[in-house]
Image: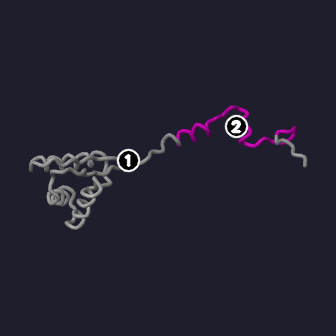
């Protein structure tokens, strides 16, 4: 099978071939700009409670209800995860600022009551 190049004598060049020949890279630049403009969504974070030997389980449940608006049943399940597994997800997904605020609010609430509850936030 003989394949002749499209630029053989007497045959017109396609627009794409003309652009390549003339060095016009506008199409390539537009494609690169579109790639740069793709914005990924912000990361989401979760708030994690950590187990300790001093914070009462009832207080952890109360904190989950007050700070994270959990139902008493959900709060009890999360508290049991904290107690049995050493940590439990108190809430999320949140933006970084909201997760940080909720973790700080939970720890401030615990400190005001004299408990050493530790709450952190981490990427999902």
Residue reaching furthest to the top: 23
- Residue 77 falls in which quadrant of the image? bottom left
- State the predominant SS element of the stretch in magenta: helix
Relative placement, left or right, of 23 versus 60 is right
Residue reaching furthest to the left: 113
- Residue 59 falls in which quadrant of the image? bottom left
10 Å crowding of disc 1: few (<14), some (14-19), many (20+):
few
Say what secondary structure mark 1 lies in. loop
User: In the image, residue 124 lies at what x, y percent?
Assistant: 37, 50
User: In the image, residue 110 lies at what x, y percent?
Assistant: 14, 50
Q: Nearer the viewer, residue 95 or 6?
A: 95
Q: Which mark is residue 43?
A: 1
In this picture the colour scheme is one colour
Q: Which residue is mark 2?
A: 19
Relative placement, left or right, of 84 versus 25 is left
The residue under the point 15% across, 52% down is 55
Relative placement, left or right, of 43 versus 76 is right
């Amino acid at each position: 099978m003989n394949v002749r190049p499209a630029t053989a004598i007497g045959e017109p060049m396609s627009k794409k071939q003309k652009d390549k020949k003339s060095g016009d890279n506008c199409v390539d630049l537009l494609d690169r700009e579109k790639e740069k403009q793709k914005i990924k969504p912000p990361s989401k974070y979760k708030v994690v409670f950590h187990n300790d030997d001093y914070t009462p389980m009832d207080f952890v449940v109360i904190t989950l209800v007050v700070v994270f608006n959990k139902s008493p049943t959900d709060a009890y399940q999360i508290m049991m995860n904290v107690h049995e597994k050493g940590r439990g997800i108190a809430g999320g997904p949140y933006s970084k600022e909201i997760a940080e605020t909720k973790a700080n609010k939970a720890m401030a609430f615990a400190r005001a009551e004299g408990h050493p509850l530790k709450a952190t936030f981490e990427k999902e």
